[in-house]
Amino acid sequence: MIEVSVETDIIKLDAFLKWSGAVSMGSEAKIVIQEGEVYLNGEVCTQRGKKLKKGDVIEFNGESYKVI
């Protein structure tokens, strides 16, 4: 699991994917989220603006990322 430190209390899902390096562009994040390829805490999440908090686990493309 890759731990990703975030400076703020919350971060939106699409911004997190870009910040963590899981995707290279925000537009790519939008597409993979809308296509149901991203899991938040074990469930498919199709909300780009979903607010993440510390401890949330995001799964995408065979990798797991934890917000710390």
Image (spheres, rainbow, N blue to C red):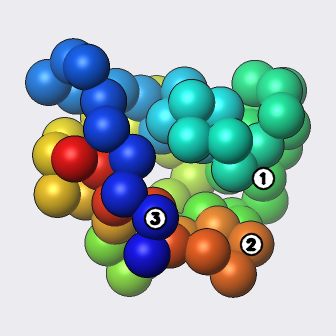
Quarter of the figure with residue 43: bottom left
- Mark number displayed over residue 2: 3
Q: Is residue 43 left or right of residue 22?
A: left
| Residue 67 rendering spot, x and y as whole percentages | 29, 49
Tell me, yes or no, if residue 68 can be seen here. Answer: yes
Q: Amino acid at mark 3?
A: Ile
Q: Residue at x 69, y 81 (%)?
A: 62
| Residue 45 rendering spot, x and y as whole percentages | 50, 59
| Residue 16 rendering spot, x and y as whole percentages | 50, 35
Quarter of the figure with residue 38: bottom right
Q: Quadrant of the N terminus?
A: bottom left
- Mark number displayed over residue 61: 2
Q: Is residue 17 left or right of residue 22?
A: left
Q: Is residue 60 above or below residue 62?
A: above
Given this view, does label 3 or label 2 mark the residue nearer the observer?
A: 3
Disc with the residue nearer the chain's start (2 vs 1): 1
Helix, strand or loop status at disc 1: helix
Given this view, does label 1 or label 3 mark the residue nearer the observer?
A: 3
Q: Residue at x 30, y 30 (%)?
A: 6
- Mark number displayed over residue 32: 1
Q: Amino acid at mark 2?
A: Asn
Q: Amino acid at mark 1?
A: Val
Q: Is residue 57 above or below residue 4?
A: below
In the depicted view, which residue is nearer to us: 46 or 65?
65
